[in-house]
Amino acid sequence: MKTRTVILDNGHGGIINGVYQTHGKRSPDFGKGIIYEGDFNRDIVNRVSKLLKSADVPFYLLVPELADISLNERCKRVNGLYAKDKSVYLVSIHSNAGGGTGFEGYTTKGQTASDGICSEFLKDIHSGFPKVKIRVDRTDNDDDKEVDYQILKYTSCPATLLELLFMDNIEDYNLLLDDKFRDKISITLAKTIQRLYLL
Ligand SMILES: [Zn+2]
C-alpha cells in the first residue's frame, strides 16, 4: 500500500453565536443537555487535527467553517484536493441516531480501495473500545456497511464515513459527552491516520 493523506470532514454545521446551523441532527436531552451532532463532529475533528499536527502527519481540513457547508460543495472540495494530491482519502466523522448502539463504518457498494481503509479504522476502534459494539456487515467479507451516501459516492478518492456511537441511546449519549471518551476516540483515529500515512 502507498502513503495516504487524510481529508477530515466534520459532518453538518457548527454553532454560530449560540445558534446550531443544522436542522435536526441532535440528541434528546437525557439530563446533561443536547448534543448537536455537527458541533460534536467538529470537536472530534479538531482533536484529531491537533494530534496529527503534533505528530507531523499532514492532513486536510475539509470544512474549517462553522456554517453548514452543503454536501455538493463538500464533494467539490474533496475532488479539488484529489485533483492536486492523489494520496488523499476522505474520512467523514458523524454520530448516529435512530435506535442502536456502538460504532459503524460505511463505504460505497462494491469492493474499492475504500473498504481496506475503512477496515483499518474499524480494527483500531475495536481494539481501543473492546466493550463497545461495532455494527458490521459481513456479507461481503469485510466489516464495513455499504451505502451510497452522497459524500462517499460523488467523491473520486477513497472515502469512508464513520458513525461514532448513537446520540439517542442514553449509554452512548453519556460517553459522547465524556471528555475522556472524546480524547480516546480522537487518539484512536489519529493512530490509524498516522499508520496509513507512514505505509
Ligand atoms: Zn451525521
Image (spheres, grey):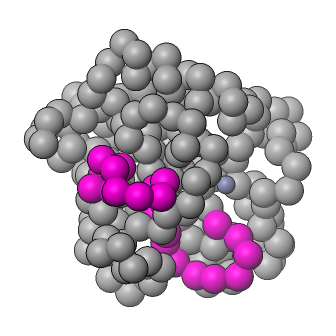
User: Could you tell me which quadrant the N terminus lies in?
Assistant: top left
Q: Is residue 101 above or below residue 125?
A: below
Residue 175 location (% of width, % of height): 56, 73
User: What is the magenta range?
Assistant: 96-117
What is the quadrant of the C terminus in the image?
A: top left
Is there any visible trace of residue 119 in the rendered image? yes
Is 111 magenta? The answer is yes
**Which quadrant of the render holds ligand 1?**
bottom right
**Who's the residue at 63% across and 44% down the image?**
150
Identify which residue, 114 or 199, lies in the foreground: 114
Give the tally of numbered discs: 0
Q: Is residue 52 above or below residue 110?
A: above
Left or right: 82 in relation to 124: right
Q: Who's the residue at 50% across and 27% down the image?
A: 78
Magenta-span inclusion, residue 84: no
Q: Is 15 left, or right, of 196 in this rendering?
A: right
At a point 20% along the width and 37% down the height, the residue shown is 197
Left/right placement of residue 9 relative to residue 73 reads left
Residue 64 in percent (x, y) is at: 59, 25
Q: Position of residue 115 (x, y in %)?
A: 34, 57
Q: Is residue 59 above or below residue 1?
A: above
Residue at 77% x, 67% y: name it.
27
Depth check: 150 or 133 in front? 150
